[in-house]
Amino acid sequence: MVSLIEMPQTVSNPVNRTVPAPEATAAETMIEISDLDFAYGTNHVLHDVSLHIPPRAVTAFIGPSGCGKTTLLRCLNRMNDLVDGAQIKRGFIRIMGTDINAPGLDVVDLRRRVGMVFQKSNPFPKSIYDNIAYGLRIAGITKRSRIDEAVEKSLRAAALWDEVKDRLHVSGYGLSGGQQQRLCIARALAVEPEIILMDEPCSALDPIATAKVEGLIHELRTKYTIVIVTHNMQQAGRVSDHTAFFYLGRLIEFADTRKIFSNPAQKQTEDYITGRFG
């Protein structure tokens, strides 16, 4: 799961932002981010971010490169712990009411509950079957029938079963790029997460593979809370229910995706959506 994190540029010139969304009730919130400041050493990347992400929906993070959206995404399962000097300066993140940075929290369990799909597909150098079974075995599941069932269920959920069911013991590297990305999604689903984080999951894919992954996201939204980082605004419009726009490390606006793209409340959002910068 270790991955190099692209460091955003140091931000400056504070910008105005709107209150991102009305206060949500606990039942309407899966992820609560409050007054979050985050830094890599002296590089202050996120400033005063507050956001309530609802359950069983797709929330997209958009904004120009270096605006902090990937950093925030990786805060949600503490992937930034793997970067020297990374630290939350202020604020908190709660998932289903639990502070994920509380002392003694089981980070391994957190990353099971909050799965991650990276920008570039990263199958293990193992068979298709063993890619899916790996997380189950790490979790202590050894019964073959249970693993078999989970492998099939996960590959079906990732819309990949029919394409690979007759070659489960072939290396995952033998799949196409789009199939490898869906294999990584199936691997994340196998351990039964509650949240799936996706960091530019289609950026390296061709249009046909992208359409398949987007169709998969549409199907998964009814069962999982999905947070996706994308530079592709058309993709955000197609797959997300809610969109958060970031600029210079600050949350500028958060609203229903249709509102963000048709009637944004902030001029900065409008300027980005219409291509005046970014």
Image: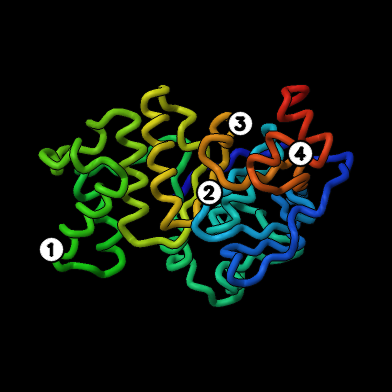
Q: Percent position (x, y) of residue 43?
A: 76, 46
Q: Nearer the viewer, mark 4 or mark 1?
A: 4
The Cα–Cα distance between marks 3 and 1, rounded to whole angstroms, is 43 Å
Q: Nearer the viewer, mark 3 or mark 1?
A: 3
The Cα–Cα distance between marks 3 and 2, rounded to whole angstroms, is 14 Å
The amino acid beneath tag 3 is Met
Using the rendered image of the protein, determine whether residue 10 is visible from the camera's viewpoint: no
- Which image quarter holds the C terminus? top right
Mark 3 Cα shell of 10 Å, populated few (<14), some (14-19), many (≥20): some
State which tag comes first along the sequence, 4 or 1. Answer: 1
Identify residue for label 4.
264
User: Number of marks in the image?
Assistant: 4
The amino acid beneath tag 1 is Arg
| CB under 8 Å between discs 3 and 4 | no
Identify residue for label 2.
58
Q: Percent position (x, y) of residue 246?
A: 72, 42
Identify residue for label 1.
144
Identify residue for label 3.
233
The amino acid beneath tag 2 is Val
| CB under 8 Å between discs 1 and 2 | no
Mark 2 Cα shell of 10 Å, populated few (<14), some (14-19), many (≥20): many
Q: Is residue 230 above or below residue 100?
A: above
Check disc 4 and report its element: helix, strand or loop.
loop
Q: Is residue 56 above or below residue 264?
A: below
Q: Is residue 132 left or right of residue 100?
A: left
- Rendered image quadrant of residue 160: top left
Check disc 1 and report its element: helix, strand or loop.
helix
Residue at 67% x, 54% y is 85
The amino acid beneath tag 4 is Pro
